[in-house]
Image: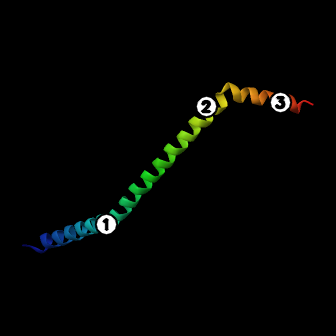
């Protein structure tokens, strides 16, 4: 084996080792990111439900009637 081949192999092994090390170091971050994603998705689902309820309340005829009565009291 000539010295040039040996240098290429050593450099390739060093790069490969760095990639593997980086993968294992960031594996915990990916798991945490997945948990954070699930938590945020649950929060978004909860907020969508609340918005649906608020839309139902605001578009309800009784709500509009109460608002009209309230506005009549403000005119005095």
According to the image, label 1 marks what residue? 22
According to the image, label 2 marks what residue? 56
Question: Which x, y percent locates residue 21?
Answer: 28, 69
Q: Is residue 69 left or right of residue 20?
A: right
The answer to which of 17 and 2 lies nearer the viewer is 17
Which label lies toward us, 1 or 2? 2
Q: Secondary structure at mark 3?
A: helix
- Label 3: how many Cα within 10 Å (few below 14, some 14–19, many 20+): few
Image quadrant occupied by the N terminus: bottom left
- Residue 70 occupies quadrant: top right
Counting residues from the N terminus, which is met first, the one under dot 2 or under dot 3?
2
The answer to which of 15 and 39 lies nearer the viewer is 39
Number of numbered callouts drawn: 3
Could you give the CA–CA distance between mark 2 and mark 3, rounded to whole angstroms? 21 Å
- Residue 16 occupies quadrant: bottom left
Q: Residue furthest bottom?
A: 3
Could you give the CA–CA distance between mark 1 and mark 2, rounded to whole angstroms? 51 Å
Q: Is residue 33 left or right of residue 12?
A: right
* Marker disc for residue 72: none
Question: Which x, y percent locates residue 9?
Answer: 16, 69
Could you give the CA–CA distance between mark 1 and mark 3, rounded to whole angstroms? 64 Å
Which label lies toward us, 1 or 3? 3
Question: Which x, y percent locates residue 75?
Answer: 90, 30
Counting residues from the N terminus, which is met first, the one under dot 1 or under dot 2?
1
- Label 2: how many Cα within 10 Å (few below 14, some 14–19, many 20+): few
Q: Is residue 44 left or right of residue 22?
A: right
Residue 51 vertical position relative to residue 8 in the rendered view, above or below: above
According to the image, label 3 marks what residue? 71
Residue 68 vertical position relative to residue 3 in the rendered view, above or below: above
Counting residues from the N terminus, which is met first, the one under dot 1 or under dot 3?
1
């Amino acid at each position: 084996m000539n010295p040039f081949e040996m240098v290429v192999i050593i450099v390739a092994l060093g790069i490969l080792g760095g990639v593997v090390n980086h993968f294992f170091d960031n594996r915990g971050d990916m798991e945490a990111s997945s948990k954070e994603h699930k938590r945020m998705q649950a929060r978004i689902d909860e907020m969508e439900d609340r918005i649906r309820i608020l839309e139902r309340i605001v578009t309800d005829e009784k709500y509009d009637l109460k608002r009209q009565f309230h506005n009549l009291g403000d005119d005095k």
